[in-house]
């Protein structure tokens, strides 16, 4: 497959603090790519740059051939985005279906009134994410796993080529994590997936490509090549024990991200 | 007894004040929830202070430059401008909006202090009127201006209800999905500032925080539907407004203080009962 996201020499400085330094990576479609790194490594900033939400200080990013910061409208139709769970406001009750419809309405012109067809599509995507039964329940009353799946439906409703998830497992119990992973595995054949994780254990066997990040790219490629003791030490600043089982590498990151 | 009640209710002061309360309740019910759900309630203090500066500036203009200018219009424009400037200075950063608010607040107070020193001393009480509000002394002009502003606020907040909800719920996501979040952010700052000016004129800058922020906080303890929060906020300001107004006719206390007192005590009672 083609390289969908090409990043070269990317530097991002925010408030005079160099958040990302000389990042150069390629991300292919139809693969599951994971960005791993400690807290404050610049993972969220990197995907915001890919989405055109943050301006690069220097270097270049091409997403499907477009510059995301300058040609944002072009790529926004093609990428579904799930921000970190703590980014949402839980003070107001919004029915899940409204959340999913947001995926369609946000890019429409004013007045943004959903049609019957939009509602049907939204329900169908809730179904694909396995949460159709909670369509009319308020988002803020759902469990972490249900919330992520509603947000996944919101991303799917645009029929994206790519989905980007920011720490989808944080605050989600093991069963919820399994349910999210099942959805993602089903999607993987048609849609490229990029996700930020602070612990890869739940999904390790499915990862095609791993980017180890701590302000700089420490290493990237197949997980088994990236997750060496030296690379992990460079990323986390301390020794990280590793378990290798059936050729899959599990770094024991525990709560070291916090 | 009944005659007393009727004579108060038919009092022209009471009728005008009732219109003022009704307008205030509509504004508070629409703006308060926008401010609290977006976590920008500190905009209230900033614009309310700018209104004082704007009123002093307006009186200065009327005294020395254009004698037929209505200071309320200048206060209104100044309040909106300061809200928009704070939004502009606060762009692009965590905590920057708060810092920008602090700066604009200091600037407005400086303007107020400056012009209070220059304007004719008999006009100074007009500026202080904005501290406690003019609910009992609204002129017909005031009522027309406040009602027009309120209608504008209602139209805009109904028109962009969905967009405001999106940016309150998930601003990053909305932007990444193609919504012009910046535009709607500015529109919401615009109507919030306008609403804060209306409330400052009617009920005063001192208690505006209680009028705007307490009702939605109270309502959100009882429900978390956005529509219900707005309706409850409207009703609580309206009902307490009428009670406060009525008591103020009996015992000559500023109604705005009574309204704030009633709102805050209800909030505390609900809080305590819920543990
Ligand atoms: N708007 C901003 N202004 C200044 N510093 C920021 C901003 N956003 C993030 N940062 C800083 O950049 C670093 C990386 O942040 P982030 O990308 O959120 O890291 P991660 O997602 O890997 O935890 C952190 O130290 C954070 O404090
Ligand atoms: Mg992050």
Image (tube, rainbow, N blue to C red):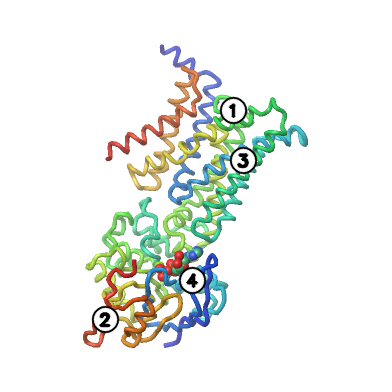
Are the residues tagged 3 and 2 within 8 Å (C-beta)? no
Q: State the separation of the CA atoms marked 1 and 2.
A: 74 Å
**How far across and how far down the image is residue B147, in percent?**
57, 36
Q: Which residue is drawn at 58% across and 32% down?
A: B130
Q: Which residue is drawn at 58% across and 48% down?
A: B83
Residue where numbered disc 2 is placed: A242
Q: Is residue B7 above or below residue A39?
A: above
Q: State the separation of the CA atoms marked 1 and 4.
A: 55 Å
Q: Nearer the viewer, residue B274 or A76?
A: B274
Answer with the quarter of the image where residue B231 lies: top left
**Would residue A150 appear left or right of A49 to someone viewing this image?**
left
Dot 2 falls on a residue whose secondary structure is strand
- Local crowd size for mark 3, using a 10 Å CA cut-off: few (<14), some (14–19), many (≥20): some
Q: Which sits earlier in the primary sequence, circle 1 or circle 3?
A: 3
Q: State the separation of the CA atoms marked 3 and 2.
A: 61 Å
Chain letter, disc 4 residue: A
Q: Which sits earlier in the primary sequence, circle 4 or circle 2?
A: 4
Chain letter, disc 1 residue: B
Residue where numbered disc 1 is placed: B138
The residue carrying mark 4 has its beta carbon less than 8 Å from ligand 1: yes
Q: State the separation of the CA atoms marked 1 and 3.
A: 24 Å
**How far across and how far down the image is residue B90, in percent?**
55, 55
- Local crowd size for mark 1, using a 10 Å CA cut-off: few (<14), some (14–19), many (≥20): some
Q: In this view, does A150 lie above or below B252?
A: below
Residue where numbered disc 3 is placed: B109
Give the mark toward the camera: 1 or 4.
4
Dot 4 falls on a residue whose secondary structure is strand
Are the residues tagged 3 and 4 within 8 Å (C-beta)? no
């Amino acid at each position: 497959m083609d390289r969908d996201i090409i990043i070269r020499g990317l530097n991002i400085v925010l408030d005079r603090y160099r958040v990302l330094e000389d990042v150069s990576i390629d991300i292919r479609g139809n693969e599951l790519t994971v960005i791993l790194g400690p807290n404050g490594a610049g993972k969220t900033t990197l995907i915001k740059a890919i989405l055109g939400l943050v301006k690069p200080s220097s270097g270049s990013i091409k997403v499907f051939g477009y510059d995301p910061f300058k040609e944002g409208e072009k790529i926004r139709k093609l990428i579904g985005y799930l921000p970190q769970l703590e980014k949402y406001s839980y003070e107001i009750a919004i029915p899940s279906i409204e959340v999913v419809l947001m995926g369609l309405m946000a890019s429409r012109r004013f007045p943004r009134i959903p049609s019957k067809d939009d509602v049907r599509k939204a329900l169908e995507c809730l179904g694909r994410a396995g949460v159709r039964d909670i369509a009319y329940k308020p988002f803020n009353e759902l469990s972490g796993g249900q919330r992520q799946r509603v947000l996944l439906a919101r991303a799917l409703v645009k029929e994206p080529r790519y989905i980007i998830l920011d720490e989808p497992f944080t605050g989600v119990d093991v069963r919820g994590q399994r349910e999210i992973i099942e959805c993602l595995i089903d999607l993987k054949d048609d849609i490229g997936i990029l996700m930020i994780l602070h612990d890869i254990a739940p999904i390790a066997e499915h990862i095609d490509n791993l980017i180890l990040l701590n302000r700089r790219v420490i290493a990237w490629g197949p997980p088994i090549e990236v997750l060496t003791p030296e690379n992990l030490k460079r990323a986390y600043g301390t020794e990280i024990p590793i378990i290798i089982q059936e050729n899959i590498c599990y770094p024991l990151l525990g709560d070291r991200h916090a | 007894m009944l005659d007393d009640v009727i004579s108060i209710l038919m009092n022209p002061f009471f009728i005008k004040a009732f219109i003022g309360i009704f307008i205030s309740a509509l504004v508070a019910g629409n703006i308060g929830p926008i401010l609290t759900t977006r976590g920008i309630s500190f905009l209230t203090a900033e614009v309310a202070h700018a209104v004082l500066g704007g009123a002093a500036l307006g009186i200065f203009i009327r005294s020395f430059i254009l004698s037929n200018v209505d200071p309320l219009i200048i206060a209104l424009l100044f309040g909106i401008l300061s809200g928009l400037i704070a939004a502009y200075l606060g762009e692009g950063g965590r905590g920057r909006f708060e810092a920008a608010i602090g700066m604009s607040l200091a600037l407005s107070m400086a303007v107020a202090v400056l012009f209070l020193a220059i304007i004719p001393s008999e006009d100074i009480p007009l500026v202080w009127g904005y501290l406690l509000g003019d609910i009992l002394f609204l002129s017909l002009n005031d009522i027309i201006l406040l009602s027009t502003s309120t209608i504008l606020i209602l139209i805009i907040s109904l028109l962009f209800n969905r967009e405001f909800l999106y940016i309150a719920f998930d601003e990053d996501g909305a932007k990444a999905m193609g919504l012009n979040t910046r535009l709607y952010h500015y529109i919401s700052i615009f109507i919030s500032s306008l609403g804060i000016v209306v409330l400052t004129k009617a009920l005063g800058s001192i208690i505006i925080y209680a009028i705007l922020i307490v009702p939605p906080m109270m309502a959100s303890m009882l429900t978390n539907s956005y529509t219900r929060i707005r309706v409850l906020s409207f009703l609580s300001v309206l009902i307490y407004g009428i009670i406060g107004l009525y008591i103020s006719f009996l015992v000559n206390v500023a109604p705005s203080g009574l309204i704030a007192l009633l709102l805050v005590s209800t909030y505390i009672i609900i809080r305590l009962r819920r543990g």
